[in-house]
């Protein structure tokens, strides 16, 4: 993996050293003149965690920060045959695991839970000390956004999570489904007056539970709602060097915003043609 942006003297230094070690030939000289860092080696989990660290708390304490992690092909498909796995890669999954390990809670739409076969987040020994130092539990909670609560509460995500799973819904959600969720040990969080959760209220409700490092993995409908509500702070987008055509969803769906919201590029990594980008609100 190599860093394409930002590149500084410090980040380029390891490759200059590698170029110098290669001798005085043309290839070594070209490598020494500023190839980005990390090319030709797998980044450690600690390096990935540093590259994707959440913002430091301000003087008033931690504020909620909502980042999304999505993957898209070159022609804009967020899925193939209804799932994201076929357009992913090993490095993408390492980043996926790292982002989860940094988060307090993973927010996901009910349809994505059903399609992707979601399971509870697991504790990872490599991140145990860092999570403990940050005051986090052994693994992030999963928060499922659902208006109908049409979910199978016997699945491991609900029946045997390491950290109790949450369901974000509205005050008008079906009472029998709310009761079924609570019987299964799920914590139902009301974050809206209608049937579904309001994105802004959902973020505030999670922050009220101590979850300020927020991560959403979609799907496209949920991400579209978060974008439309103006509550998304950061997008981590993997661009897969693939073309799929077809009518697959984009990473965000739903009604268009009135004025496109511009985000700033914060970093870009590359491996095997896959681009791993981070964009954040200005």
Image (tube, rainbow, N blue to C red):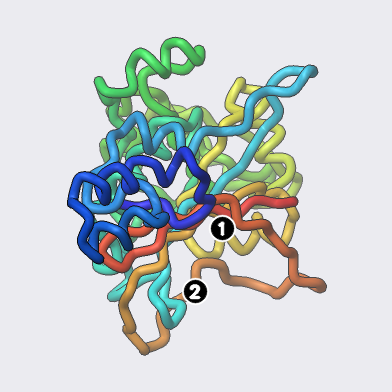
Which residue is the site of mark 1?
222
Q: Residue at x 36, y 59 (%)?
A: 270
Q: What element carries label 2?
A: loop
Establish if 126 lies above or below 190.
above
Q: Earlier in the sequence, mark 1 or mark 2?
A: 1
- Coordinates of residue 116 in the picture (x, y in percent): 31, 56
| Left or right of 263, for residue 133 | left
Q: Nearer the viewer, mark 1 or mark 2?
A: 2
Foreground of the two, 16 or 237: 16
Cα–Cα gap, marks 1 and 2: 12 Å
The residue furthest front is 24
Q: Find residue 85 and report its image quarter.
A: bottom left
In the rendered image, is residue 165 in sight?
A: no
How far across and how far down the image is residue 194, in percent?
72, 51
Residue 135's tag is none
**Residue nearest the viewer, comparing 163 with 250:** 250
At horizontal 74% and vertical 23% (from top left) the residue drawn is: 58
The residue positioned 67% from the left and 32% from the top of the image is: 64
Question: Which numbered dot is residue 250?
Answer: 2
């Amino acid at each position: 993996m190599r860093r394409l942006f930002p590149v500084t003297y410090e980040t380029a230094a390891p490759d200059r050293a590698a170029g110098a070690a290669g001798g005085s030939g043309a290839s070594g000289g070209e490598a020494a003149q500023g190839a980005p860092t990390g090319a030709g080696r797998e980044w450690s989990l600690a390096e990935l965690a540093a590259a994707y660290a959440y913002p430091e708390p301000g003087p008033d304490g931690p504020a909620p920060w909502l980042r999304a992690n999505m993957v898209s092909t070159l022609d804009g498909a967020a899925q193939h045959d209804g799932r994201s796995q076929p357009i992913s890669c090993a490095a993408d999954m390492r980043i996926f695991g790292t982002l989860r390990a940094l988060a307090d809670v993973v927010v996901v739409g009910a349809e994505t839970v059903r399609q992707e076969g979601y399971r509870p987040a697991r504790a990872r020994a490599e991140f145990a000390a860092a999570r403990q130092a940050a005051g986090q539990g052994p693994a992030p909670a999963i928060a499922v956004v659902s208006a109908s609560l049409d979910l199978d509460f016997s699945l491991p995500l609900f029946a045997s999570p390491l950290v109790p799973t949450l369901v974000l819904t509205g005050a008008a959600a079906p009472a029998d489904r709310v009761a079924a969720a609570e019987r299964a040990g799920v914590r139902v969080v009301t974050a809206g007056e209608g049937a579904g959760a309001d994105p802004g209220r959902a973020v505030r409700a999670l922050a009220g539970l101590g979850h300020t490092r927020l991560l959403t993995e979609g799907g496209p409908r949920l991400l579209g709602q978060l974008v439309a509500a103006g509550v998304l702070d950061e997008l981590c987008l993997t661009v897969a060097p693939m073309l799929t055509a077809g009518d697959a969803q984009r990473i965000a769906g739903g009604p268009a915003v009135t004025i496109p919201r511009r985000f700033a590029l914060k970093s870009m990594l590359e491996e095997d043609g896959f681009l791993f980008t981070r964009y954040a609100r200005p």
